[in-house]
Amino acid sequence: MSRVVASDEAFDTQVPLVIVGAGAAGLCAALAAKEAGADPVVIERDAVPSGSTGLSAGLIPAAGTRFQRAKGIDDTPSLFAGDIQRKAHGENDAAMVELIATNAGPTIEWLADRYGFPFDIIDNFNYPGHSAFRMHGLPTRTGAELIDRLRAAAEASGVTVLTGSRVETLFAGTDGRIRGVELVRGDGGHERIGCDVLVLACNGYGGNLTLVRELIPAMADALYFGHAGNQGEAVLWGRALGAELVHLGAYQGHGSVATPHNILITWAVIMEGGIQVNAQGRRFCDESRGYSEQAAEVLQQPGGIAWNVFDDRIADVARQFEDFRNAEKGGAVLTAASLDDLAGRMHVPAAALTEEWREAERCGTSGATDRFGRSFGAAHDVVPPWHAVKVTGALFHTQGGLAVDASARVKRRDGGVFPNLCAAGGAAAGVSGETASGYLSGNGLLAATVLGRLAGLAAAHHVSAVGSIKSRSDADAAD
Ligand SMILES: Cc1cc2nc3c(=O)[nH]c(=O)nc-3n(C[C@H](O)[C@H](O)[C@H](O)COP(=O)(O)OP(=O)(O)OC[C@H]3O[C@@H](n4cnc5c(N)ncnc54)[C@H](O)[C@@H]3O)c2cc1C
């Protein structure tokens, strides 16, 4: 049950700053706030914080970083902002895109320099829509490593994280300020905590089927591949508070989840020249536009599945991802010495598969675009053996949410902002426009880390302003 209760009552326990959710957004907010002198209390429903962050590939795009410069990659925040807007068909708030693109580089360098995150750049393939190599990843290329490092940094910094505690209720005063929260612990006990500032970092509503049915009916029957804790409280509380909610139909889908193994197969297999065919061995669209919109395309194919088909050179690029190595170990990747044999293993017509691959190969060599308008980029020699993975389309996370200003403060539906309520990550509206096709790779963790840090800084600033007001009124009372 998520609700907002109107109340001006005082709380037994009062803290300066509460952050709901200990994913990338919540922990970046907590680290930034702690550095700026505030003492945050992070409330997390799981026993060990993980969230969708822990399920992700942990890749964060940023432009103009020292990691890019070290590899001679020429990139700027404005080029990055242009890519974000192009992918989102210009549907984002331009000022928000600029804010996020400009702060992404400093956020990556902050995590690297202050907390020792060993980022490097993926530079042996590029993701759709990015005009420079700018995906910053950790050595294992996993979100598990990202969340482990964030958790360790929070612990080392002395951030208080109340785990196994789900926030159910927000208390809002008659003056429009948030007064505090009520949480439910694993043992069923309830606790109320008052706060000067509240940051919502509890992600979106991908795990709440009622909201998915209402807001993204096309994905209501799709596999949900995100974290079960993404139950949409930010949307529900936002509605009750009269907050502005934008782009609620936006989401990140993925058209490449191995089935029935449920392992993410990196889109590198497509971007490096692989193709997707359906159960009839036929291609059905330009796969290279993006993996997010591809989820719905795959689900529309017979049986709601497709096959990723690629050669061994491409498999080698994919092997940098632990998920892909696990997929190979788990038997999700079929291998054969010829396309005919591969088609036999896939149970698809060999003639159709061979024809589709040869057409793609011809376009790759000649530089021509294919019948779907896809261009295959640089020509490569095909290196046998061949591989195929049966995949389906999945919902990863939602991208719409609470509209925020440049300090991550939540906007009101009737104008202005809530003075002491911030949102970041999947709880806030992202920069992916209105639909799945607006999602540029990395937009999820981009909004989580960048807005998380900005929310933490803004919250700390607010906490210190409240502290000064309180000490002034205490002094006045003493006079
Ligand atoms: C398989 C997969 C791969 C992905 N790969 C990438 C990638 O490589 N790059 C990228 O940019 N994005 C990726 N994403 C998206 C990315 O994971 C999310 O956008 C990002 O993790 C959101 O961070 P967050 O902190 O907002 O949410 P989360 O990481 O989901 O954290 C929210 C936390 O809030 C907690 N919580 C929720 N409600 C409450 C409550 N009421 N009380 C207390 N706690 C609560 C949850 O338990 C959770 O721990 C991927 C997503 C998936 C599913």
Image (cartoon, rainbow, N blue to C red):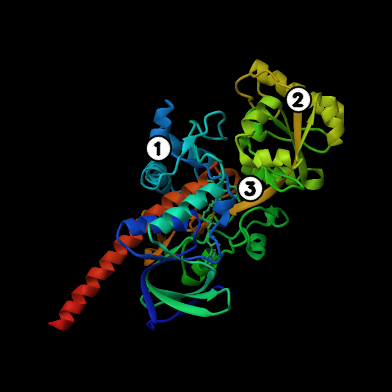
Q: Quadrant of ligand 1?
A: bottom right
Per the image, the residue denoted by label 2 is 385
Q: Amino acid at mark 3?
A: Gly
Left or right: 176 as drawn, with respect to 466: right
Residue 327, quarter of picture: top right
Report the mark closest to the observer, 2 or 1.
2
Image coordinates for residue 162, horizontal then vertical, percent: 48, 68
Is 232 placed above or below 69 here?
below
Reading the chain from its start, which is encountered first: label 3 or label 1?
A: 1
Image coordinates for residue 238, horizontal then vertical, percent: 49, 67
The reply to whether dot 3 and dot 1 touch (C-beta < 8 Å) is no
Reading the chain from its start, which is encountered first: label 2 or label 1?
A: 1
Q: Amino acid at mark 2?
A: Pro
Left or right: 14 as drawn, with respect to 202: left
Q: Secondary structure at mark 1?
A: helix
Reading the chain from its start, which is encountered first: label 3 or label 2?
A: 3
Q: CA distance from mark 2 to mark 1?
A: 40 Å
Q: Secondary structure at mark 3?
A: strand
In the image as oriented, which residue stretches furthest toward the left?
A: 479
Per the image, the residue denoted by label 1 is 77
Per the image, the residue denoted by label 3 is 253
Image coordinates for residue 211, horizontal then vertical, percent: 63, 63
Is 373 placed above or below 445 here?
above
Task: Report crowding for label 3: few under 14, some 14 to 19, many 20 or more residues within 10 A (C-alpha).
Answer: many
Identify the residue at image location x=38%, y=34%.
Answer: 66
Q: Secondary structure at mark 2?
A: loop
Instruction: Determine if residue 265 is in view.
Output: no
Instruction: Determine if residue 439 is in view.
Output: yes
Identify the residue at image location x=63%, y=48%.
Answer: 253
Q: CA distance from mark 3 to mark 2?
A: 30 Å
